[in-house]
Amino acid sequence: HKSRRESRNGEKVEIEQTIKKFYNDDQIFHIESPGTLEGGDVMRVGDHFYVGLSDRTNEEGAKQFHEIVTKFGYTSSTVPVTEGFHLKDFAIYLENNNLLVTSLMDQEPSFQNFNRFVIDPEELYAINSLYINGTVLVPAGYPKTKALIETLGYPVKLVDTSIGLQELVGGTGMPQTVEHDLLKLRVLGSPQTVPFRQQLRCNGQAVRQSEQLPAVAVFLRGVLLVLLQLFKPCQQFFL
């Protein structure tokens, strides 16, 4: 993808090299300028993609994305992002027509046919939950959100995110979508999720090969962003 933030565009080079290990060049597509698209603005629901129009994803990027995915039998539509950085900062799909949303996204016309569950304002970080193979991974320390997801019938696995990431995000202005990516990064490296990682590798029916790639991309993206943020205070010594 091409990001409107120039500082993010270097990530696609790293990700593309990994993707090429799985796909031929004619199976890899790019968002071309003036189009911009951020992964945090793309939410898949079955065979449909909701693309958030934000400061980092524009109409042209959404149009190019639509032209690409329709070649493979998917559809897409756009949703205005009127708060925060990305669509998935404020709306997360849990399968079975269930959607976690903020109070503002609860009013979004595109989402009115979903079962919408508004996250408590004090637990907005917990919207960074992740559905994998029937189980929802939820950040630890958010009991209301955990209870809500359990009442919907999902098995829940708590993931300890108390490794300074929330403070890092809050202190540097790192977008919340990065928190979601870092949760995935934490999940993929956690001993608690060995069965999930094995399923990702081995169970072709549960997770197709094309769906394994975001984990690799998230790993690279997460590492790069954490390093950039950690070393930002030191830049003055090298300039």
Image (spheres, helix red, strand yellow):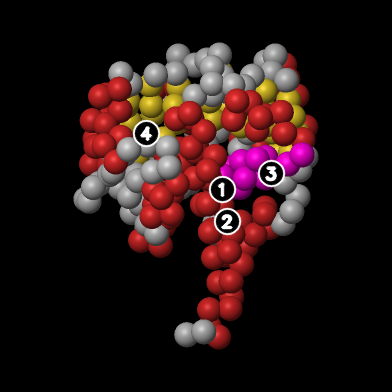
**Residue that carries the numbered disc 2 in the rendered image:** 223
Q: Is residue 116 visible?
A: no
Q: Dot 1: what SS? A: helix
Tell me what residue is drawn at x 58 percent, y 78 percent. Answer: 234
- Please, what is the three-letter code of the amino acid marked with disc 3? Gly
In this rendering, the answer to whether 30 lies above or below 153 is below
Q: Is residue 169 visible?
A: yes
Mark 1, other Cα within 10 Å: few <14 / some 14–19 / many ≥20: some
* Left or right placement of residue 96 versus residue 126 in this view: left
Q: Which range is magenta?
A: 179-191
Q: Which label number is shown at residue 51?
A: 4
Q: Residue 124: x and y, percent?
A: 63, 39
Q: Dot 2: what SS? A: helix
User: Mark 2 touching mark 1, by CB under 8 A?
Assistant: yes
User: Mark 4 touching mark 3, by CB under 8 A?
Assistant: no
- Please, what is the three-letter code of the amino acid marked with disc 2? Val
Q: State the CA–CA distance, disc 4 to disc 3.
A: 29 Å
- Earlier-in-chain disc, 2 versus 3: 3
Tell me what residue is drawn at x 44 percent, y 27 percent. Answer: 44
Q: State the CA–CA distance, disc 2 to disc 3.
A: 12 Å
Q: Dot 3: what SS? A: loop
Q: Residue 91: x and y, percent?
A: 51, 32
Q: Nearer the viewer, residue 142 or 131?
A: 131
**Residue that carries the numbered disc 3 in the rendered image:** 189
Q: Residue 145: x and y, percent?
A: 70, 29
- Please, what is the three-letter code of the amino acid marked with disc 1? Phe
Q: Nearer the viewer, residue 217 or 237?
A: 217
In this rendering, the answer to whether 112 lies above or below 92 is above
**Residue that carries the numbered disc 1 in the rendered image:** 219
